[in-house]
Image: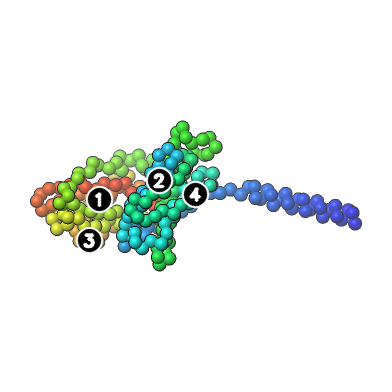
Amino acid sequence: MHSTKAVMLVLLILSLMFVGIGTATETSVFPVPVQTIQPPVNLSIGVQVDQMGSQINATFRGGFGQNLLKSLQITVTSPDGTSQTQNLGWETGNTVTFTGTGCGDQVTGTAVYMDGVEYPFLNEMMSSVSGICSADFREVTDPCAEIAASPSLKPDPIEEIPANKSVIIQANVDIRTINVEFRGGFGQNLIKSLKVSRYAPDGAIDIKDLGNTVGSTVSFEASNNCLDRIGADVSFMDGTQYHFYDQVLHISRTH
């Protein structure tokens, strides 16, 4: 009887040891695997993410879907797997601030609309800041760093259009498709031509004509899974021309 109890006790101790080992070896994945999905144009929103040292700010910049939002959550995940989540208001200019690690934190965002549909629209990797990042965190390598260094992705200087001839366009990325939409402006009926260019990192350029009716859209297929550049040039009936838009866009990708 005593020997039976001793065997059972040993088996119990061994089983507890194996359970403990299984828990200890479980590791989290970083960066968090996210495939961003941009809302359709009529629900589009803009969130700007900035980093100053270890401080990370996310600011709401408006969009067609501004008044249709139910919630807007921003999450910052550190290389050690810890995360912070805050609700971002959807009045233009609303900001939330996080204290990151300065070691390549990941910023993700999810927009939930009144109809209950969710869009994981944001997935950005912050830079690792020298002098702030401690040795306790592993350095995060950016798979897009080489592409980002391409001379083709360096924006050209923007020429300011006089206010009485203003032209507004908006560029969004929907997974692998870049959509550029005409949004109006005082110069809408004065436009002779409006050309939108997609600049790929390898130097290839794709140019399309964008109509000057509000809602007119042209689409480009992303040339890679990291970055593409969109530029726009407008010519007016009076002969003036302006290179008025030039932005590098982050293409959605699955990590």
Say which quarter of the image contains residue 62: bottom left
Residue 55 in the image, given as x and y percentages of width and height: 43, 41
Q: Which residue is mark 2?
A: 57
Q: Residues within 10 Å of mark 2 (few under 14, many from 20)?
A: some
Whole-number angstrom distance, CA of label 1 to CA of label 2: 30 Å
Give the residue at x 40% y 67%. 115
Give the residue at x 25% y 50%. 197
Side of 74 relative to 166 (left or right)? right
Q: Is label 3 in contact with label 2 (beta carbons under 8 Å)? A: no
Q: State which tag comes first along the sequence, 1 or 3.
A: 1
Residue 231 in the image, given as x and y percentages of width and height: 25, 48
Residue 191 in the image, given as x and y percentages of width and height: 15, 55
Q: Which residue is mark 1?
A: 197
Helix, strand or loop at label 4? It is strand
Whole-number angstrom distance, CA of label 3 to CA of label 2: 32 Å
State the residue in front, 209 or 212.
Answer: 212
Give the residue at x 26% y 46%. 246
Whole-number angstrom distance, CA of label 4 to CA of label 1: 38 Å
Q: Which residue is mark 4?
A: 84
Residue type at mark 1 is Ser
Q: State which tag comes first along the sequence, 2 or 4.
A: 2
Q: What's the mark number on residue 97? A: none
Q: State which tag comes first along the sequence, 1 or 2.
A: 2
Outermost residue toward the top in this view: 131
Q: Residues within 10 Å of mark 3 (few under 14, many from 20)?
A: some
Q: Which residue is mark 3?
A: 214
State the residue in front, 223 or 46.
Answer: 46
Say which quarter of the image contains residue 36: bottom left
Whole-number angstrom distance, CA of label 1 to CA of label 3: 19 Å
Residue type at mark 3 is Val
